[in-house]
Amino acid sequence: MTMPTLDFPPFRLPDDAEALRTEVRAFLAEELPKVKTTDKFRSWNTRSPEFSKALGARGWIGLTWPKERGGGGRSFLHRYVITEELLANGAPAGSHWVADRQSGPNILRFGNEELKSALIPRILKGECFFSIGMSEPDSGSDLASVRTRADKVDGGWRVNGTKIWTSGAHRSHYAIVLLRTSGQREDRQRGLSQLVVDLKSPGLTIRPIINLYGKHDWNEVVFSDCFVPDSMMLGEEGDGWLQVTSELAHERSGPERFLTNFHVLTELARLVGRQPGARAAETVGKLVTRLWTLRQMSLSVAGLLENGKSPVVEAAVTKDLGTLFQQELPEIARIVAESDAADEDDLAQFLDLAQMATLQAPAYSIQGGTTQVLRGIIARGLGLR
């Protein structure tokens, strides 16, 4: 019996995708100095509606979407280049990120004409922002155990229940929410549907969850007889589980899974200088090697997707290893900096940056699928369970 194996074939971005990189870098060099945020350290999940509008004006939101819908009609590989440059430069892309990466594609694939006409043009302009309403209290990573219900009423659905860890809901216009529209919690994947919910709707309350580093990024979203019109249903009633698993595929193996803390690595290299001590040089070299390996794995998955393959296990491996790298990087960098930094002021600033990255790190185990879920996917894919 032949056991399944992992497949990471070598892959390089095509020349026209790499040519786009030059344009993106020139755009960022011009736009980033204009951005004003309250964040002490630049990061891709910093939110700047002005920056999102500027990116939309260049046609770089919805780059892969059909031209007849106003999109760029370009390949996933071109979008990969833009994503990589936004991340590497700490561009404040958080406002439009979810809408561009997964909500817009979900609406294009499953939404009715009314939804597409109303929302897609606004997303493309960088003027309409989305959150994801999947997780629930006391459910852990068991996404199928949905208790939030949508009951059919005249002209729409009446929603009751609670979603949690809803990133950016207080700054978004809409959320795509996974709900139970028929059956009971024990029915698992059956009877689930997704509704596009206006976050200003009556009967909807957004409560802040303050994270470890004192910021309001996450939220608890409570529905109390919140009415959602029929036109806001994605696809047909009961299609929610298929849609969610498709949506998660957009999250799993992109550059954000290993470049979120890239600024820590670049600042460490700057801090130790061009002639670091032997220990610092070895450690930075190992970190760069891990980063480059993850990039090659991610590119391989991108190439498989571009060729119509479904590299579910490979994407899970890339995300799991990327999580480990991003969580370990700040502490490794701190140890090197404390032993090799020559300037006390530079060291103090770097330690602040590393501490912030350390406080953010626990979230990486959840985003895009928890570590336990990913390892279950890998084990099943390799025939180990």
Image (cartoon, rainbow, N blue to C red):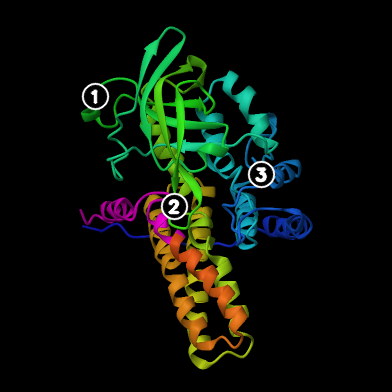
Q: Residue at 26% of width from left, 21% of height from top?
A: 183
- Element under disc 3: loop
Q: CA distance from mark 2 to mark 3?
A: 37 Å
What's the residue type where badge 3 is placed?
Arg
Q: In the image shown, does 62 or 146 lie closer to the viewer? A: 146
Examine the structure image and report whether residue 365 is included in the region drawn in magenta.
yes
Towards the viewer: 86 or 350: 350
Q: Main secondary structure of the magenta part?
A: helix
Q: Secondary structure at mark 1?
A: loop
Does the magenta run of residues contain 36? no
Label 2: how many Cα within 10 Å (few below 14, some 14–19, many 20+)? some
Q: Which mark is residue 184?
A: 1
Label 1 neighbourhood size at 10 Å, few (<14), some (14-19), many (20+)?
some
Q: Quadrant of residue 203?
A: top left
Judge depth for marks 1 and 2 and give the one in front. 2
Counting from the top left corner in percent of width and height, residue 259 is at 54, 62
Which of the numbered marks, if any, corresponds to residue 74?
Answer: 3
Q: Earlier in the sequence, mark 2 or mark 3?
A: 3
- Calculate the distance from the C-alpha at mark 1 to the C-alpha at mark 3: 42 Å
Going by the numbered disc 1, the residue's amino acid type is Gln
Position of residue 362 measured from the top left corner of the image (x, y, whole percent) = 39, 58
Question: Which disc is residue 211 wearing?
Answer: 2
Is label 1 or label 3 in front? 1
Span of residues in magenta:
360-385
